[in-house]
């Protein structure tokens, strides 16, 4: 039995592969971005309109009809709550978009899988890249909203990248895992719709973790996305520092999901061509 090279045993070798195939990765990322608006009358404008429309919908339902508030600031207004929802949805959507598209990533590239010697690992990464592009547009709108409506960005906002890093690791791990599993389990696409909705309401998008009853928190505390969304609001909107324990837990889970997703993809990809 031949000696296995170190780079074949270490999941983080994917970063070496991404650099090696950076040109291909860029091409597929651009293709995924363009596919989102291809044939659309408004084109890229939808990337701005969609997050604004979603914010307006959820803010009306939860902020106006149900009079929802995060309750962190005593003088919080409906507008403050809307900005919080916008930031929370923007952060959540980065993962949800990858999850929703991942099950068909390999299925939608049958010709590549069957006929070309190709680093298949970069296909889910390209999807994450496209989602980061959409995220970038939405986060710019968040900051514009903060400026326009008279709020101040304090020094804590520079901690925001520390919140984004585990979200990116989670997105990559989820992308690899579900794209590989989706080849063998075709019903996964239907299940993902329910999982995304479940994740939306269990990720502290419309409320703070502190408001959750203890009986529910016993389950909610295991969701790293809920902690990361809470921390994003702290540093961007509420001028509060990051909390060590939720961040440490989220980083640990994110690294674990990243490794599990990559290893799962590497394990299952040898059978893709036979199944397709």
Image (tube, rainbow, N blue to C red):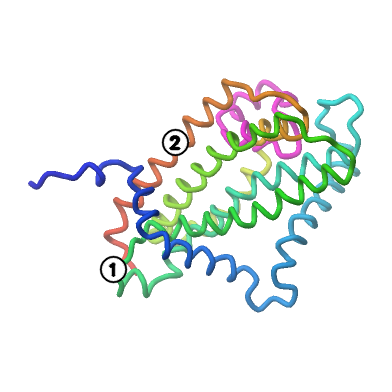
Residue at image point 64% right, 50% down: 93
Which of marks 2 and 1 precedes in the sequence?
1
Residue 200: image tag: none
Camera-side residue of 98 and 188 = 98
The C terminus - image quarter: bottom left
x, y percent for residue 253: 48, 33
| Label 1, residues with CA under 10 Å away: few <14, some 14-19, many ≥20 | few
Camera-side residue of 219 and 33 = 33
**Left or right position of 143 against 149:** left
What's drawn in magenta, residue-wise?
203-228
Q: Secondary structure at mark 2?
A: helix
Q: CA distance from mark 1 to mark 2?
A: 29 Å
x, y percent for residue 109: 42, 70
**Left or right position of 217 against 273:** right
Residue at image point 34% right, 53% down: 17
| Label 2, residues with CA under 10 Å away: few <14, some 14-19, many ≥20 | some
Q: Residue furthest left?
A: 1
Q: Quadrant of residue 115?
A: bottom left
Q: Is residue 99 above or below residue 213?
A: below
Q: Quadrant of residue 71?
A: top right
x, y percent for residue 219: 59, 28
The residue at which mark 1 appears reads as: 117
Residue 255: image tag: 2
Residue at image point 64% right, 32% down: 159
- Is residue 218 found inside the magenta-colored segment of the image? yes
């Amino acid at each position: 039995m031949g000696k296995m090279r170190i780079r074949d045993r270490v999941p983080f070798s994917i970063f070496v592969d991404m650099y090696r195939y950076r040109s291909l990765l860029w091409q597929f990322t651009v293709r995924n971005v363009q596919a989102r608006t291809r044939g659309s009358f408004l084109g890229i404008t939808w990337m701005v309109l969609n997050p604004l429309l979603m914010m307006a919908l959820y803010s009306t339902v939860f902020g106006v009809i149900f009079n929802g508030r995060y309750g962190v600031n005593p003088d919080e207004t409906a507008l403050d709550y809307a900005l919080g929802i916008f930031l929370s949805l923007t952060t959540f959507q980065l993962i949800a978009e990858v999850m929703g598209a991942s099950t068909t990533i390999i299925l939608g590239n049958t010709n590549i899988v069957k006929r070309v010697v190709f680093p298949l690992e970069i296909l889910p990464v390209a999807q994450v890249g496209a989602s980061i592009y959409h995220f970038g547009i939405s986060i710019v709108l968040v900051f514009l909203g903060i400026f326009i409506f008279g709020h101040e960005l304090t020094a804590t906002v520079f901690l925001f990248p520390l919140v984004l890093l585990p979200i990116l690791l989670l997105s990559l791990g989820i992308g690899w895992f579900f794209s590989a599993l989706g080849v063998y389990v075709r019903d996964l696409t239907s299940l993902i719709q329910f999982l995304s909705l479940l994740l939306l309401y269990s990720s502290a998008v419309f409320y703070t973790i502190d408001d959750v009853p203890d009986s529910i928190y016993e389950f909610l505390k295991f969701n790293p996305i809920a902690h990361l969304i809470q921390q994003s609001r702290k540093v961007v909107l509420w001028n509060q520092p990051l909390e060590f324990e939720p961040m440490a837990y989220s980083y640990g889970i994110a690294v674990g999901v990243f490794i599990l997703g990559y290893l799962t993809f590497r394990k299952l990809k040898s059978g893709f061509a036979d199944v397709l």
